[in-house]
Every structure is written in C-alpha cells, then in structure tokens.
Amino acid sequence: MKSLLILFALIQTSLLNAQTFQPFKSSQPKRFENIDNLNSNHFFYSTYESVSGDTVINLQYLRESDNTIDVSGTSCEGWGGSIVPTVDTTWLGREIKYNALTKELIVENNTNEILAFDFNLPLGDSSLFYQNSSYNYYLRNDGFSEEFVIDSLDWVKTFTLWKFDLFDNIEPSVLNGFEIKLSENYGLISFIECNQFPLVEARMILKGQLYPTIGYYQLTMDEIFPWQVGDTLQTKGIISNMNWGTGTISHKIFSIQNRVETSDSVWIYLTIDEQVDYTPYGATNYPSPYNISYDNPIVFKKGDNISDRPNNMIDYEGITTFNDSADFCGYKSRYHITGEFINYCEDCDCFTPYDGFGNSILTNTYISGMGQTHKSVNNYGPITQNIHANLIYSKINGVECGDFAPLNLSEKTINLKLYPNPVKDLLFYEINEKIGGISVSNLQGKNQEVSLYDGYIDLSILPQGCYFILFNLENGKTSNAMIIKD
C-alpha cells in the first residue's frame, strides 16, 4: 500500500511539473463575474504582451473612467486641450507579470502595492502574497486534482486565501477559505479583484473564455441571428451634408428566404430589396447610399461570439464597447462598439486626444434577436456630414416592432420551380427572371463546379448529398433552394 501511495505521489509530482498552468495568456480572453454581485463582470484582455527573461508581461485592457485630469504643461497635453479622461486599469491592475520559472504571478493595486501569488508552493505550504501595516494575507496550496472547469475536464491546482492580523490572529474576511483555482488549459478560473484590493475584497469566478471557447463570454452569433424563414427586417440609412441638407436616404428590406443548420454551422439566406431616394438641394453630386448590410448568406459557427473584445473596453485602436443601453423598441443593446479619437499615455495614466483630422468615429450596435440595429459615421474635423443607419422595423417569430415604411420597389414575385427533386443528373428549372449566374455549395459551404444550360443544370459530377443552389438574377435579386442529389 505504501508503495502505491509513493507511486501516486511521484505521478502527481510529475504531472505537476510537466504542466505550465499559466494564469493568463494573451491569446485567451477571459470573462469573470463577482460571486457577490453577479451583474459585475470583469474581463482579462491583453492589449500588449512582452517577454523579459522568464517573465511574461501582459498589459490588461484599458477602460475609460469618469474622472479627468489636467495635464497642462506636461508631455501628455497632446493635441486638443489640457483636461483629458483618465483610465480605469480594471480589476487586475494595469500590468500583469508571470514568471514561468518561479510560477509567480505579480500584479499591482491602484496604489502601486505589490500582490505576489506563488503558484509553485509545495502541497500544504503557505506564502505571504500581500502585507500592509495592519494585515497579512496568505496563499496556501491545498490540492491538485482533475475536475470540471465549467463543462470541460481539466487538471486543477487549488489554493486558499487567509487573512491575519500582525499577531497571526485570523481576521474576518470573505476571502478566508476562498479557493483560487488554476487550471492547466484555462489558466485562472477563480481569483480576486486586485486593483482595489485590500479596500475591496471581491471573489471572482470564470464565466467564459475564448480559444478554446468555454462558458459564456459575450453575445453569441446564435443569439443575434435566430431568424427563421418568413422573418423580415427593414433598415433606413441617411447620409447628409450640412451645405445641402439631406443628401441620400436608403431603405433596405431583408427577408429570410431560407435557414439551414448543420451540426456546427448556420446558413441564413436573404432576399434584399433596396430603394435609394435623393433629395436635391442644389448639389451637383450626391453621396453614395449608406445603410446596414449583411453577407448573403449569413454564415456563422454555432456558439461563436460576435467579437473577441469584451464590454467596456478601450484598446490602442480606440474600440470601446458598452453594455445594455436602451435601443430599438425598448430592447437592451447587448454589444455596442464605438471608435474614439484617444490614445493612452503611460506617463499620466490618461487618454489624450490626437489629431484625427478627416477621419471618422464608427459606431455599431447589435441586439439579441435583432442583428445590427445601428451604424453610424461621425467625421472628425471640418467635414459636417451626418451618416447613420438604423433598424426601423422587424417582424421576427411573428412579433412586429417599429414602423414599416412602404417603398416604391417593384414587388414582382420571383417564381422558381426546380424538378425533379431529388435529382439524379439533370435538374430542370423554370424562373420568371433573367439569370446572371448560379452557385452551388454543399452543407459545409464549399462551392461545387456544375454546368448551367438554358432550362437545366447538369449535376451528374456531384456526389450524393444535399446542396444549395443560389440563382443570381440580372435585376440584382437572388433566389435559392435546397436540392437532394441521389
């Protein structure tokens, strides 16, 4: 029995040494939630990674705060003024250092105090990870086992936290006995809020991660596009110039013609009708139409997130996201992306405007079930154009929202007839429009080479299976159908 225990200990030690258990990786955006406040979500998103010896350094994503700072006369004054917004360094602090050799994670709180977590502790040992004039906080290695991380089995190290006074008496704390868990493939899966620690003692658990994707990270493509055959959406785009008033108005009607789901993907085929109105005010040239647009078909992998970027994020490119702002028909916006003309300055830990003369601020808003509901361009500088598009009507699963705008579009129905279906070699078609071309694809989306003739399509070279045929018509419209090849 003793030999078996020694063998198990040796195997466990070998596994422990063979695995890196890196807490955070730049390639793995993570989403945590506060155990005591489930509406408080926190993200790890590396905006920059560097290596210094054995230490990997990640700069955590930036979030603009409500505070401003006067940087007059400093190197941070930049272009555009002296009062600039400051940065919230988020829950982990600005800089995250991990030494792959010593297995030590080092972060700083918002008063530049060090928190050092030793993940190389022998089983049962403890180490001091933070100390001030009143308290000591300890990290203890409590175990190593295989367990489920959300819904995936993985090897996990478990540590517990304990708070003591300077006389080694245990102090009341919500962190006492809290388990910090470090997974082999997913890094830290439970941790604490570091930026405001020790003023704030907050416990965090992993809610989702990308690459590999587990749990819930943000709004998924499945939630955005639940559209079924018969659903309809209408958008309105406007582009105007203050010198001439309204320049161009564009209406689009998106009708869901077909929806096909494979084991891992979704294909949504659209009929798109567009009407462009010009309102002349003496201008000789009018701006091009501006509106929300979608690929046809819309193709996405089940479970994919709409973006890699977390909510509330500002990075070097100036992308910000906001969560749950009211939008179309009272629905809550789940993902809102805005570009800002701001750069982060290391010297003052603040954002400074830069000269974006002639460039644009882009905004895109997505709502669960509604797709993209808003899109706009705000030019920066003397160009006084108003460019935006909005969802104005939807009929999804029989529920109508907004006001449909009747258009002067030709509502000629496209009549398409295919036979026989299932087909062996020759597929005959009848259609009341001129065909500009066709494309045939299998369920995986791979295009297939076929021969198109007047009145029929030769499918003899295709293997048995299901295929999509998309007819591109000369009037700009499309029509599609699914056929079975025997």
Image (cartoon, helix red, strand yellow):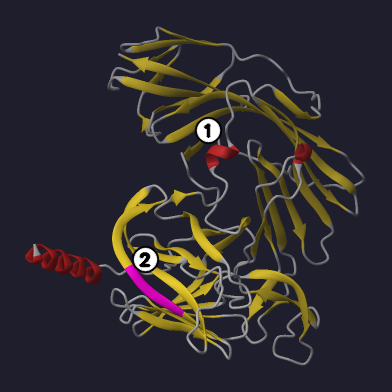
Horizontally, is 248 left or right of 28 in the view?
A: right
Most frequent secondary structure within the magenta stretch: strand
Quarter holding the N terminus? Answer: bottom left
SS label for mark 1: loop
Residue occupied by mark 2: 158
SS label for mark 2: strand
Horizontally, is 181 left or right of 315 in the view?
A: left
Q: Position of residue 10 (x, y in %)?
A: 15, 69
Between 479 and 361, the one nearer to me in the picture:
361
Q: Is residue 432 above or below residue 470?
A: above
- Magenta segment includes 414: no
Residue lying at 47% horizontally and 75% vertically, measured from the top left: 162
Quarter holding the C terminus? Answer: top left
Q: Is residue 486 above or below residue 248?
A: above
Question: In the rendered structure, which segment of residues is drawn in magenta?
Answer: 138-142
Q: Is residue 453 above or below residue 81?
A: above
Residue occupied by mark 1: 297
**What amino acid is at disc 2?**
Thr
Q: Is residue 302 above or below residue 359?
A: above
Q: Position of residue 384 (x, y in %)?
A: 84, 59
Query: Residue 41 lies in what quarter of the image?
Result: bottom right
What label does residue 73 carry, if any? Answer: none
